[in-house]
Image (cartoon, grey):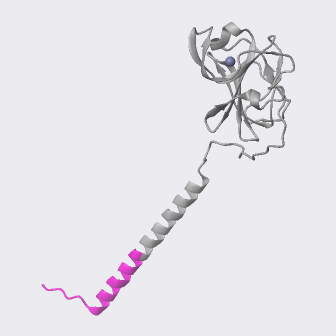
Amino acid sequence: MKTYTTTKEKKNRKSLLALIIGLALIACAVIITLCVTLTGTEDVGGTILPPSGDQTKQYVMPLSEYTLGKDFSDKLVYNQTLKQWRTHNGVDFLAEKGTDVVAIMDGKVLSIENTTLEGTVITIEQIDGITAIYKSLSAEVNVEEGATVNAGDKLGTVDLTMATEKKEGSHLHLEMKKDGEYLSPLEYLPEGADK
Ligand SMILES: [Zn+2]
């Protein structure tokens, strides 16, 4: 038996096809919108504070009483504890255990870590775009992660917790970093030149 397609059936097929295409287009639009929305709300992570480049803010010393220990050196210096020649990425402020350590500049506490090799380490992202890393602190600290600190605020106390520099005695090992490069802290600190 032969079947014939009538004009009416053809019309019906055409409108059905148009409906399917229409629905497909709407589905595409919905998917694209969802993708864009989800990408937009994705947590980008990383920087908490945008570097403001504020150069007017003054640095303060991290300790009020100290003796300057080993200075920053991007050349190899001998490490008594490890009996190794290595770079010294920060500056050491020798002080009695329990001496207060304060923030050298305004910023936000990025992390507080208790490490075997470097003791308690507080990392602060400063308003000038530099990251300050305070090492060899006592396990008990005075700030929390995410807290905003001002220059002079107490962070914790000096201790003997940095295993890689144990021979130096209790001290603060302070590092400063920008764009992945270590900086010499004494070039920024007010008493840097004459101590
Ligand atoms: Zn050190």
Is residue 138 something that shows in the picture? no
Residue at point 56%, 55% (across, down): 38
Q: Quadrant of the N terminus?
A: bottom left
Viewer-side residue, 112 vs 190: 190
Q: From the viewer's perspective, is residue 97 above or below residue 112? A: above
Is residue 115 something that shows in the picture? yes
**Does the magenta portion include 15?**
yes
Q: Position of residue 62 (x, y in %)?
A: 81, 25
Viewer-side residue, 152 vs 18: 152
The part of the chain drawn in magenta is 1-21
Most distant residue in the front direction: 194
- What secondary structure do most residues of the magenta stretch adopt? helix
Q: From the viewer's perspective, is residue 111 above or below residue 100? A: below
Most distant residue in the bottom direction: 7
Residue at point 79%, 22% (across, down): 156
Residue 25 left/right relative to 5:
right
| Quadrant assignment, res 186 | top right
Q: Position of residue 167 (x, y in %)?
A: 67, 7
Q: Position of residue 8 (x, y in %)?
A: 31, 91
Q: Position of residue 22 (x, y in %)?
A: 43, 76
| Quadrant assignment, res 122 | top right
Quarter holding ligand 1: top right
Viewer-side residue, 187 vs 34: 187
